[in-house]
């Protein structure tokens, strides 16, 4: 073991760890090889992978499409070339498919040339696709013209004293609500909850917008007022058609009858309900196509020294993005070609090191993340190795832009473990450690009681879920730091006593 492993605090000794069946190599030799392994990590090689995955070959890698399969084949081919093992039954239909876990899904697409018009006597505005609005990606087809009613944060929860729909009839109206919630509303609320409330109240469609007052988290991540790609993710029901509109467009709608969106949001944030008719009509028109498809996770493995009894460490990154929607390409360079490139580079570095870890390392390239963590939930339902022996899951997502530091979210492990890996990677001043990071493929693992570490580049991500998330915005030095850190962390966790 290396020096840094000897000072691992007792509190994160992992319960049930098996005794090695093979003696580790000479510690000095191992330490030297590992230093070389870290030094060999290349940001420019990862940038090439990001450019390839977010380029025209893969069309935005939408879950369930042929682009999902082709990007999965690329990752499987790389895993095989690196010498990882295929943990699945090799008797399946073709060699590369034995690296894949598959599941039927619906691949939905908004067809090109949707339209959103706003009619306020005597003016009419044609909203600009992308800049002013984006249809919600699992919206059904729609052709509706109806008055817009503003309904605050869109919360219908009278039992907790919050009902933005109180005293309103929104049947056959288009409701407009803000994203997020007032601080006083303690319960969690999702987009799916708000969509369901609007549907149950009989609305014809919805619009949603980010308010001008951002939460601390939104400020930290550089969330702008621009519309982003989004799924409603309703449970089985046919969702209401909806669009995310820009903060500027929402301001304009409220200004038609001299409401200030800023003042209204200030009142809402003091838990004072504000709902009213805006005097503006919305005309929404688009076609949506829902097609059956297949989701593909790709899984490769470095078997641990403890062979059959080894504990397991999972490193994952989602590969899927939104594909082509409403005629716009969502390349998903930062989200998450960057994490996929890091996953491949970590696999390359660890296999090139020639070192055998104590624990088995399982590499998973997930699909279905953007549609609601479908690929990671699939793995948790059908784990390839026992979950009871899976000691931690490391998730890399959005690792290509930002301010150069890494945000590391830790659950189920002492934060010191995350800090120690940074010291070993030469990045002691380069990380900020937090607790649970909201959202991502680590969430189902955390729910299953497995420790998780989420690695994300810190600072603003201004192209988040937008067509501008392209490879030319990606910084190879940030990819390099993410890969160095992740390699050090995984090696540390894979060899902890
Ligand atoms: Zn995303």
Image: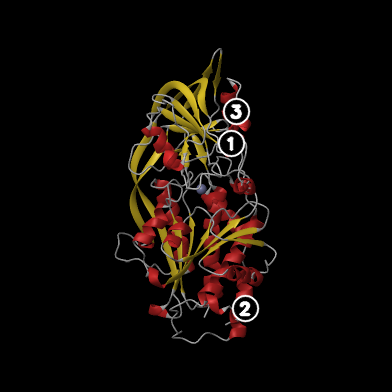
Helix, strand or loop at label 1? It is: loop
Name the image quarter holding residue 21: bottom left
Mark number, residue 4: 2
Q: Position of residue 79 (x, y in %)?
A: 46, 64
Residue 267 left/right relative to 201: right
Q: Position of residue 360 (x, y in %)?
A: 45, 73
Q: Earlier in the sequence, mark 3 or mark 1?
A: 1
Residue 387 left/right relative to 472: left
Q: Badge 3 is on which residue? A: 251
Q: In which quarter of the image is the N terminus?
A: bottom right
Q: Badge 1 is on which residue? A: 211
Helix, strand or loop at label 3? It is: helix
Q: Give the answer, above or below, for where 202 lies relative to 478.
A: above
Q: Where is residue 345 in the image (x, y as percent from the top left)?
A: 55, 63
The residue closer to the viewer here, 350 or 182, is 182
Helix, strand or loop at label 2? It is: helix
Mark number, residue 96: none
Q: Give the answer, above or below, for where 15 lies relative to 379.
A: below
The residue closer to the viewer here, 361 or 447, is 447
Mark 3 CB within 8 Å of ligand 1: no
Q: Where is residue 194 in the image (x, y as percent from the top left)?
A: 44, 38
């Amino acid at each position: 073991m290396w020096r840094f492993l000897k000072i691992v605090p007792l509190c994160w000794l992992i319960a049930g760890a098996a005794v090695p069946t093979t003696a580790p190599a000479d510690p000095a030799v191992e330490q030297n090889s590992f230093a070389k392994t870290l030094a060999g990590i290349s940001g420019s090689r990862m940038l090439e992978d990001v450019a390839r995955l977010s380029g025209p070959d893969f069309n935005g890698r939408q879950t369930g499409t042929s682009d999902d399969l082709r990007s999965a084949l690329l990752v499987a081919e790389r895993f095989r070339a690196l010498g990882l093992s295929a943990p699945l039954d090799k008797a399946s239909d073709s060699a590369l498919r034995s690296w894949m876990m598959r599941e039927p899904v619906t691949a939905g697409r908004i067809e090109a040339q949707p339209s959103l018009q706003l009619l306020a006597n005597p003016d009419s505005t044609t909203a600009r696709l992308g800049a002013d609005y984006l249809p919600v990606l699992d919206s059904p087809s729609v052709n509706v013209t109806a008055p817009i009613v503003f309904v605050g944060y869109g919360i219908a929860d009278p039992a907790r004293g919050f009902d933005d729909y109180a005293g309103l009839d929104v049947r056959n109206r288009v409701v407009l609500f803000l994203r997020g919630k007032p601080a006083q509303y303690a319960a969690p609320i999702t987009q799916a909850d708000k969509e369901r409330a609007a549907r149950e109240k009989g609305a014809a469609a919805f619009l949603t917008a980010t308010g001008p007052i951002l939460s601390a988290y939104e400020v930290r991540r550089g969330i702008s007022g621009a519309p982003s790609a989004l799924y409603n993710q309703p449970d089985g029901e046919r969702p209401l058609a909806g669009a995310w509109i820009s903060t500027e467009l929402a301001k304009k709608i409220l200004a038609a009858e001299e409401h200030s969106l800023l003042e209204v949001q200030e009142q809402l944030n003091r838990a004072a309900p504000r709902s009213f008719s805006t005097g503006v009509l919305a005309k929404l028109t688009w076609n949506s196509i829902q097609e059956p498809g297949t989701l593909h996770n790709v899984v490769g493995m470095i078997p641990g020294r403890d062979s059959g009894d080894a504990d397991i460490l999972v490193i994952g990154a989602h590969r899927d993005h939104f594909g082509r929607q409403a005629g716009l390409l969502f390349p998903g360079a930062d989200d998450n070609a960057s994490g996929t490139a890091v996953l491949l580079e970590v696999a390359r570095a660890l296999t090139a090191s020639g070192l055998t870890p104590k624990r088995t390392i399982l590499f998973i390239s997930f699909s279905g993340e953007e549609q609601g963590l479908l690929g990671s939930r699939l793995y948790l339902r059908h784990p390839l190795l026992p979950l009871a022996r899976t000691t931690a899951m490391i998730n890399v997502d959005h690792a290509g832009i930002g301010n150069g530091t890494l945000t590391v979210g830790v659950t189920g492990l002492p934060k010191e473990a995350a800090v120690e890996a940074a010291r070993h990677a030469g990045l002691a001043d380069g990380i900020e450690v937090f607790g649970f990071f909201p959202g991502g493929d680590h969430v189902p693992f955390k729910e299953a009681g497995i420790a998780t570490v989420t690695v994300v580049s810190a600072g603003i991500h201004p192209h988040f879920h937008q067509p501008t998330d392209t490879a030319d915005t990606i910084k190879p030095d940030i990819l390099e730091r993410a890969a160095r850190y992740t390699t050090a962390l995984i090696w540390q966790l894979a060899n902890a006593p």
